[in-house]
Image (spheres, rainbow, N blue to C red):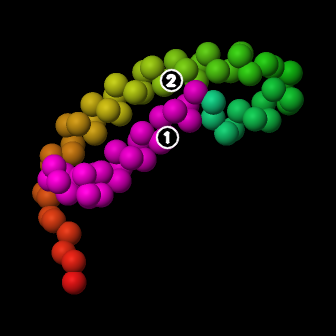
Amino acid sequence: MQSATDIGVNLGWSVQIYNAAEALPNLINPFWMLPLPGVLSLKARDIVGYTFLYLLILLPVVLGLLTLLAPTMPFHPPTYR
């Protein structure tokens, strides 16, 4: 939060950017994939190729939207009492 305050970014957007950075790698090996190999007799490599494709498509879209929309909210410095 200190770095977001130092560069003047809205704290709500800095949290959303952190969430996106944490969620995008989950597209490579998502949690919902765990039961599929046993249920559908698949191997993990059969599924990961599709999820990696989603990562390649969604990464520039999400990062672009975060870059474009982050300046739309004004910066209000935190007040300490």
- Whole-angstrom CA distance, mark 1 to mark 2, is 12 Å
Label 1 Cα crowd, 10 Å radius (few <14 / some 14-19 / many 20+): few
From this viewpoint, is residue 56 visible?
yes
Looking at the picture, how far across and down is residue 39, in whole percent? 85, 30
Looking at the picture, how far across and down is residue 23, in whole percent? 49, 40
Identified at 14% across, 58% down, the residue is 75
Q: First in sequence, mark 1 or 2: give its number.
A: 1
Which of pointers 1 and 2 indicates the residue nearer the eye?
1
Label 2 Cα crowd, 10 Å radius (few <14 / some 14-19 / many 20+): some
For the C terminus, the quadrant is: bottom left
Looking at the picture, how far across and down is residue 63, in whole percent? 32, 32
Residue that badge 2 annotates: 54
Identified at 40% across, 27% down, the residue is 59
Q: Is residue 41 left or right of residue 21?
A: right
Residue that badge 1 annotates: 23
Tell me, yes or no, whether the highlighted magenta stretch contains residue 69. Answer: no
Looking at the picture, how far across and down is residue 68, in whole percent? 20, 37
Q: Which residues are magenta?
A: 1-28
Q: Residue 6 versus residue 68: which sits nearer the camera?
A: 6
Q: Is residue 25 left or right of residue 65?
A: right
Amino acid at the residue labelled 2: Tyr
